[in-house]
Structures are given as C-alpha cells and as structure tokens.
Image: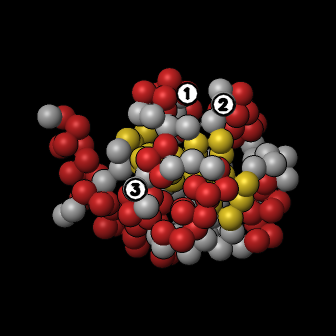
Amino acid sequence: MRDIFLPKLYVDSINEITAERLRNNGIEGLILDIDNTLVPNHVADADENALRWIESMKMSGFKLCIVSNGARKRVVRFNERLKLYAIHRAMKPAKKSFLKAGRLLGLQNHQIAVVGDQIFTDIYGGNRAGMFTILVKPIDKREGRLVRFKRIFEKPILKRYAARTEN
C-alpha cells in the first residue's frame, strides 16, 4: 500500500484542527469537503459548529475554499452564509479542482491542507496535488451504498496510518 492514500493527519472532527496545528505545518489555506466533513450528508446548510469553526479559521488568517463533488445547487446553498470560494462537481480525486482551488486561494500547493472524510477522494486527490491532507472521521454513519462500499477498503489504510503514528 502506498503512502499516497495516507493522510498526514487524522482527527475525530474539524474542531481538532486548530490554527496553531496548521501553522506548525506551514499551512495558510484550507480546501474543505462538505458532506460528512463539515456537516452530515442530509444537512443542507452550515450548522453552528461548522460556522463557528470556519469563522475562527478566517479570523486566524486562513484562506478557505470548498471543493465538493456535490451538485451546484447543493454547494451554492451550503455556501450562502459562508461566502467562501467554492467548486462544485469537483470530480475528486482528480487533481484539476484541487489545483484550481489553490489558484483561487493564491497559495502554493504545499501551503494548503485538504480536509475531508474520504480517503479515495479527498486524501488521495490532495496527496496527488502535493497538499497536506487531513482526514476527518465521518460525522454520520448514514451514507450511500457506494461510500459504504469504499469504507471497507479504507479500513486497512487506517490501520497502516495507526501503525505509522505509533512509531
């Protein structure tokens, strides 16, 4: 198994991602997934937790961009209160949208962290783009069939991550 699937950091929730932790890794910008990273899949709007965390990141000087495989309508509605750069139908793990987000943020790839809940979209794509990757445990267990199927293949990767961090 290659390191291209391993996140640089694995956290229980976005609340564990602090400005200090990001700065210690040379991060100045964030690419954010929506579904099961910031809010559960079935939640249309940013909740108070997501709003509070995003505002704290903005106040700390970080540049933010949403990159989602979701439809335009989903991403636009979610972003109404946030007013962030946003890319819909991103086709993750393809690098194109990650690189576009980097251009929007005006940062070099190594200055950007990709935050998401899926190894085969967010982490793989972010690593391929040369970005720092942060895997967040999924917020909600209710997921579509395809995502549940992919989670089976994530388990050995998470075991490898755990073994690597123990050493």
Quadrant of the image containing the N terminus: bottom left
Residue 148 placement: quadrant: bottom left
Tell me how many marks there are.
3
Which residue bears the numbered disc 3? 130
Q: Is residue 41 left or right of residue 153?
A: right
Element type at mark 3: loop
**Is residue 150 in view from this perspective?**
yes
Which residue bears the numbered disc 1? 19
Residue 96 placement: quadrant: bottom right
Q: Are marks 1 and 2 in contact (CB under 8 Å)?
A: yes
| Picture layout, residue 62 above or below residue 157 | above
Q: Are marks 3 and 1 in contact (CB under 8 Å)?
A: no
Q: Is residue 112 left or right of residue 47?
A: left
The x and y percentages for residue 36 are 58, 54
Crowding at mark 2 (Cα within 10 Å: few <14, some 14-19, many 20+): few
Q: Nearer the viewer, residue 148 or 88?
A: 88
Amino acid marked by disc 2: Gly
Please report the residue visible at 66 percent of the width from the left and 30 percent of the height from the top.
Answer: 61
The x and y percentages for residue 59 are 71, 27
Q: Is residue 58 left or right of residue 118?
A: right
Query: Of callouts 1 and 2, which one flags the residue occurring earlier in the amino acid sequence?
Result: 1
How far is mark 1 from mark 2, CA to CA?
9 Å
The x and y percentages for residue 39 are 65, 49
Element type at mark 2: loop
Element type at mark 1: helix
Q: Is residue 77 left or right of residue 35?
A: right
Q: Nearer the viewer, residue 158 or 148?
A: 158
How far is mark 3 from mark 2, CA to CA?
22 Å
